[in-house]
Amino acid sequence: MNIIRVATYKDLSEKASQILLKQIKEKSNSVLGLATGGSVIGTYELLVEDHKKNKTPYNQIKTVNLDEYIGLKPNNPYSYHYFMNQYLFQHIDLLEQHTHVPKGVSDDFQNECHQYEQTIEQLGGIDLQLLGVGVNGHIGFNEPGTSFQSKTHIVDLSPSTIEVNSRFFNTIEEVPTKAITMGIQTIMNSKKIVLLASGKTKAPILKEILKGEVTENVPASVLNQHPDVTIIADEEALAN
Ligand code: GLP
């Protein structure tokens, strides 16, 4: 794993946006795997800033998001769909039909999971997957104990994830208890992976990941088995 140590969240966002821009410049029809959460907001803001200034084109770029809460429609302000529109999609010239976020509302989730895997396959796989990491080591919403062979699936969120993510909601009762997420194998099939870790709450889990022991109890530890992973972490996250 390639570790990039930076001083602050701002530096982390700059590094991550540079890596994404390099990918977009080298392959204008790249398939980008995107994440939500606090770790990636700064990166998206810099991509938007760059687009305004340099007109970097996204009209051939395809995107696939990691996950979505079950029960939230795309226009729900707490949904990941809404998050992506708010922070990135509406500000750049990405075509709506080129963006993919798993559906949080469906009559047939088994089919939705299957379709999502098909979509990724039809796009030719993910060129670069951006990841955050949960304090319990989850990637996407793959909680501890998830099989490394998993594909897109429905998960029960752990009480700790519900609590941590409640900061994005008015009350903890509003946090959905289930989600749809790319599986660990889906993520591992990406050609390149970039994981962002910022702040002292991520220090213990980052230490676990960097120890190199690969265990399903720490989902992100699987990244030790991927040939092209870059972790960008700030000093607080690397403090342990
Ligand atoms: C959330 C998301 C993940 C995200 C992670 C870290 O639950 N499902 O995709 O990477 O937790 O979030 P944050 O960046 O806000 O710390």
Image: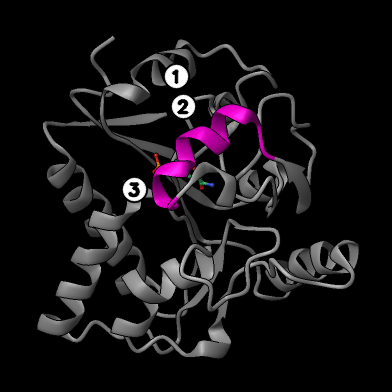
> Which element carries disc 1, helix, strand or loop?
helix
SS label for mark 3: helix
Q: Is residue 75 left or right of residue 198?
A: right
> Disc 1 vs disc 2: which is toward the camera?
2
> At which x and y percent is residue 197?
34, 34
Query: Where residue 219 is drawn, which disc sits there?
Result: none
Tag 3: amino acid: Gly
Q: CA distance from mark 2 to mark 3?
A: 13 Å
The residue identified by callout 1 is: 205
Which amino acid does the dot numbered 1 rest on? Answer: Ile
Classify mark 3: residues with Cα within 10 Å, few (<14), some (14-19) or many (20+): few
- Identify the magenta region: 157-170
Q: Residue 60: where, in percent of width, then height?
A: 45, 86
Q: Position of residue 161 (x, y in %)?
A: 55, 34
Say which residue label 3 marks: 38
> Which numbered marker is on residue 135?
2
Query: Quick check: is the Cβ at mark 2 less than 8 Å away from ligand 1?
Result: yes
Depth check: 178 or 134 in front? 178
Callout 3: CB less than 8 Å from ligand 1 = yes
